[in-house]
Image (tube, helix red, strand yellow):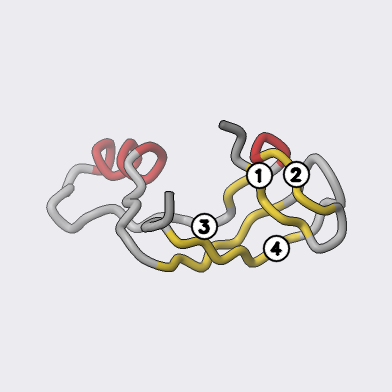
Amino acid sequence: MVLRLACPHCGPRPVEEWVYGEVPDPPDYLTGADERDVDRGFMMGNTEGVKVERWFHSGGCRRWQTITRDTTLD
């Protein structure tokens, strides 16, 4: 399965051409600076529902896009 994101300028493009642009917030229970850095980089939550995210199309038009996705859909 190939994940594709729809670009209004370039059409549907593979996710490898995109860079995720949000900065996740680490949970409050992580108190150490090193723990918070690891969590910020690798442990993003993926809760159910509709998400609005910012992605940069680095492999195409080089523009920021706001993308809405529903994590409850297959």
Residue drawn at point x = 60 percent, y = 40 percent? 3
Mark 3 burial class by Cα count in 10 Å: few <14, some 14-19, many 20+: few
* Residue that mark 3 sits on: 22
Between circles 3 and 1, the one closer to the viewer is 1
Mark 2 burial class by Cα count in 10 Å: few <14, some 14-19, many 20+: some
Q: Earlier in the sequence, mark 3 or mark 4?
A: 3
Between circles 4 and 2, the one closer to the viewer is 2
* Residue that mark 1 sits on: 4
Identify which amino acid the numbered label 2 is placed on. Answer: Arg
Pick the front one: 38 or 62: 62
Image position, residue 33 (x, y; %)? 26, 43
Q: Earlier in the sequence, mark 4 or mark 2?
A: 2
Q: Earlier in the sequence, mark 4 or mark 1?
A: 1
* Residue that mark 4 sits on: 65
* Residue that mark 2 sits on: 13
Between circles 3 and 2, the one closer to the viewer is 2
Estimate the spatial distance between the alpha carbons at disc 3 and disc 2, rounded to whole Å. Answer: 19 Å
Q: Are marks 1 and 2 in contact (CB under 8 Å)?
A: yes
Estimate the spatial distance between the alpha carbons at disc 4 and disc 1, rounded to whole Å. Answer: 14 Å
Image position, residue 45 (x, y; %)? 32, 51
Estimate the spatial distance between the alpha carbons at disc 3 and disc 4, rounded to whole Å. Answer: 12 Å
Horizontal placement of 63 versus 32: left or right?
right
Q: Earlier in the sequence, mark 3 or mark 1?
A: 1
